[in-house]
Amino acid sequence: MKNSRTILMYITFVLGYICAIAFAFFKILDYPFGIPVIILGFIATLAFIILAIYEVFKSSKIKTYEKIIWTVCLFFLVNITGIIYLIVRKKHIISTTV
């Protein structure tokens, strides 16, 4: 069973994507409440970044240069890095987190 932090990471990542798509939809069709939706998406994405960086830096098996690369990529390429992080690296990092 996945721990609560892992579930929270998946929820915040997906919520960020859903809010971005909803914001685009609201903006194209001129619906109100687009700004609160994108703010929610921004907060969800920021929470994902913070949780991911916390797990990366708590891992003892990942080398320092890998931690720096993950951090820089999470800040500048959050969508691509988030997918890679959740699918590929998650098992490696979680298993070494204390």
Image: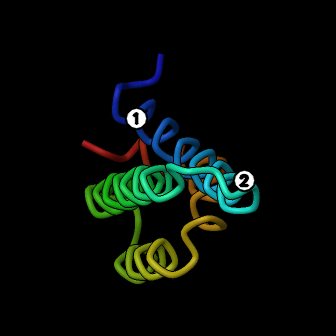
Residue 83 image offset from top left, x and y in percent: 65, 56
In this rendering, does residue 92 appear at all?
Answer: no
Name which residue type carries label 1. Leu
Tell me if 94 is positioned left or right of 23 in this view: left
Q: In this orientation, which residue lies closer to the viewer: 70 or 49?
A: 49
Number of numbered discs on residues: 2
Mark 2 → mark 1, Cα distance in angstroms: 25 Å
The residue that mark 2 highlights is 25
Residue 73 image offset from top left, x and y in percent: 52, 78
Name which residue type carries label 2. Phe
| Residue in view at x 33 percent, y 52 percent | 51
Q: Earlier in the sequence, mark 2 or mark 1?
A: 1
Q: In this orientation, which residue lies closer to the viewer: 45 or 67?
A: 45
Answer above or below: position of 32 versus 72: above
Q: In this orientation, which residue lies closer to the viewer: 1 or 35?
A: 35
In this rendering, does residue 66 appear at all?
Answer: yes
Provide the secondary structure element on which disc 1 rests.
Answer: helix
User: Given this view, does label 2 or label 1 mark the residue nearer the observer?
Assistant: 2
Q: In this orientation, which residue lies closer to the viewer: 66 or 82?
A: 82
Q: Quadrant of residue 3?
A: top left
Tell me if 58 is positioned left or right of 84 in this view: left
- Residue 8's tag is 1
Colour mapping used in the image: rainbow
Q: Residue furthest top?
A: 1
Q: Residues within 10 Å of mark 1 (few under 14, many from 20)?
A: some
Provide the secondary structure element on which disc 2 rests.
Answer: helix
Q: Quadrant of residue 56?
A: bottom left
| Residue in view at x 75 percent, y 61 percent | 28
